[in-house]
Image (cartoon, helix red, strand yellow):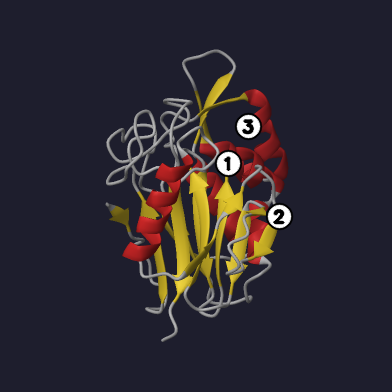
């Protein structure tokens, strides 16, 4: 199993990790460390991968979600119930908040006491999933890390997407460049997220250096191959 760890300045008792597609038991096209239970993979393979992940991280429990590209942020629970939401938070030690992605932007948050994870595709980002998740945090010393997502040279969107972001925040126009395809734009989802976080006062933002579409060895990408697996992004705090 290969994991990516954030390079950020969060307190030492705050832990986070992102899975790659390497080191699991799923067969093609989900090869091999798929944790998505909704993409057509064998349930036994997904369960095995999820169990291996929690064992590797020495985590007794995790909150898995059914994601719907919305803005709901729920409190994580250790009861093994899968809740419908696109973000979750907790103040409980050794309980991981988990979201799944395969091009969308995974974002983790902490104020030192609470942790949270959010799934931000362009719809959720435009509708305010990051701002909703931030409401679960304190108002100071918030650290945010932007995990692996589709990169700015390949994330093509239509004019309606660009206009929606620019109508909300004029500076968003700098996050789009014209595509070679007429009426299309290349969007920088990392910059779009950063602008929205900065607008509500978050200054400690890191990450944003990956491209799930281009890095075929490590990452699943829905835009590259619609029938594919999902990575998991987890954040949790330890008891000490």
User: Of the residues under marks 3 and 1, which one precedes in the sequence?
Assistant: 1
Position of residue 191 measured from the top left corner of the image (x, y, whole percent): 50, 46
Q: Is residue 156 above or below residue 144?
A: above
Indicate the secondary structure of the residue bearing disc 3: helix
Q: Nearer the viewer, residue 21 or 190?
A: 21
Position of residue 26 measured from the top left corner of the image (x, y, whole percent): 36, 38
Furthest residue in direction front, as rendered: 44
Mark 2 sits on what residue?
72
Alpha carbon distance from label 2 to label 1: 14 Å
Furthest residue in direction top, as rendered: 182
Residue 240 relative to residue 3: left or right:
right
Q: Residue at x 69, y 46 (%)?
A: 70
Mark 3 sits on what residue?
162
Alpha carbon distance from label 2 to label 3: 23 Å
Q: Residue at x 38, y 71 (%)?
A: 9
Mark 1: few/some/many CA within 10 Å (<14, 14-19, 20+):
many
Residue 27 relative to residue 160: left or right:
left
| Res. 146 visible in picture | no
Task: Answer with the quarter of the image where residue 12 lies.
Answer: bottom left
Q: Residue at x 49, y 68 (%)?
A: 61
Mark 3: few/some/many CA within 10 Å (<14, 14-19, 20+):
many
Q: Is residue 43 above or below residue 50?
A: above
Question: Depth-wise, is mark 2 or mark 3 nearer the camera?
Answer: 2
Mark 1 sits on what residue?
121
Question: Depth-wise, is mark 3 or mark 1 nearer the camera?
Answer: 1
């Amino acid at each position: 199993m290969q994991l990516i760890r954030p390079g950020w300045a969060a307190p030492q008792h705050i832990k986070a990790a992102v899975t790659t597609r390497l080191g699991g038991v799923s067969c093609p096209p989900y090869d091999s460390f798929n944790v998505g239970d909704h993409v057509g993979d064998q349930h036994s393979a997904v369960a095995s991968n999820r169990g291996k992940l929690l064992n590797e991280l020495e985590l007794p429990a995790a909150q898995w979600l059914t994601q719907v590209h919305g803005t709901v942020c729920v409190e994580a629970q250790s009861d093994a119930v899968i809740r419908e939401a696109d973000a979750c938070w907790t103040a409980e030690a050794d309980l991981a908040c988990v979201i799944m992605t395969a091009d969308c932007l995974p974002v983790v948050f902490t104020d030192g006491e609470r942790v949270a994870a959010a799934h931000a595709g362009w719809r959720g980002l435009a509708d305010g999933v990051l701002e909703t998740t931030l409401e679960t945090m304190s108002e100071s010393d918030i650290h945010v890390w932007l995990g692996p997502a589709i990169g700015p040279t390949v994330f093509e969107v239509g004019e309606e997407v660009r206009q929606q972001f620019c109508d909300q925040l004029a500076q968003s126009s700098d996050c789009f460049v014209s595509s070679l395809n007429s009426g299309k734009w290349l969007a920088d989802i990392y910059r779009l997220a950063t602008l929205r976080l900065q607008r509500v006062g978050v200054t400690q933002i890191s990450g944003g250096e990956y491209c799930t579409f281009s890095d075929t060895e490590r990452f699943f990408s829905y835009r590259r191959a619609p029938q594919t697996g999902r990575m998991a992004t987890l954040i949790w705090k330890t008891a000490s």
